[in-house]
Image (spheres, helix red, strand yellow):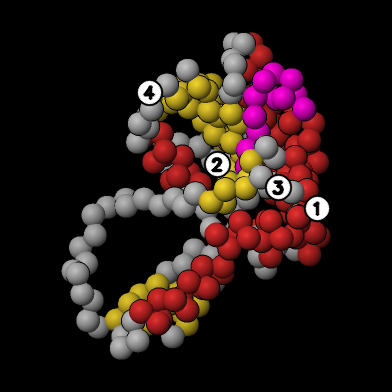
Amino acid sequence: MRHVFLIGSNGIPASYGGFETFVEQLTAHRKDQEIFYHVSCLSEKKGEFEYNHARCFQIKVPKLGPAKVIYYDTASLGECCRYIKHHKLADAVVYMLGCGVGPVFGHYKRKLHRLGAKLMINPDGLEWKRDKWSPLVRRYLKWSEKRMVKHSDLVICDSRKIEEYIKTEYSAYEPNTTFIAYGADLSKSTLTACVRKGVLIMPKEVLDWREIQLVSRLTRNRKIKGTRAWRKSIYV
């Protein structure tokens, strides 16, 4: 049995964000019965429960404001080490979603390697570029990303552009990367094969606007309207 620990999302059942939906869909559509998933869940209490045939372990996080994410991810790494050691799991994989715990990442990599486990990350988008963060937070996120790429056994990117950025920006570390796209149909589409009046594009992040250039070329005779909900702005 191969044990895979999915940490860094808010947990499942999914109620917020792409990482949570990814974890929900991954566990729900498990094909290999020799893989067993462990999922960290942000909570106000400690405990465990089963969902999608995965072990969900709750991490109690105090009210620390923005710092609670760092606390949560660090505590999740610690719990993975504890569980792997206690149950003597061989060849386990810890998959961290996000890049917020650079200061402690090298430490936990060494602990996990001593236990025979591997440590992988998904760096998400360029979190440090988002203007919702203060300049100080952005500098921390960029530095944290650098540390985590340096110490990862594998960097899994869900965008070819992100993979290209990781390889170029951190070439000194010769990072081991791979590209795995993910997405899910949460409900059956009601769109017909041909949309005559126009195309509505709703990218989640600023980076996704690069894809609009491609879409525009494929839909030259249609009106394209895009919206970024997080900014409540419209681009036509």
Q: Earlier in the sequence, mark 2 or mark 4?
A: 2
Q: Name the residue under label 2.
A: 9
Residue extending farthest top: 87
Instruction: Say the numbered circle drawn on residue 33.
Output: 4
Q: Is residue 50 visible?
A: no
Q: Mark 3 points at which residue?
A: 175
Q: Earlier in the sequence, mark 2 or mark 3?
A: 2
**Left or right position of 178 against 108:** left
Q: Which of marks 1 and 4 is nearer the N terminus?
A: 4
Instruction: Say the numbered circle drawn on residue 64.
Output: none
The amino acid beneath tag 1 is: Ala
Q: Which of marks 2 and 1 is nearer the N terminus?
A: 2
Q: Mark 1 points at which residue?
A: 172
Residue 207: image quadrant is: bottom right
Give the magenta part as a residue range: 110-121
Q: In this view, does 236 lie above or below 215?
A: below
Instruction: Give the percent coordinates (x, y) of residue 166.
Output: 68, 56
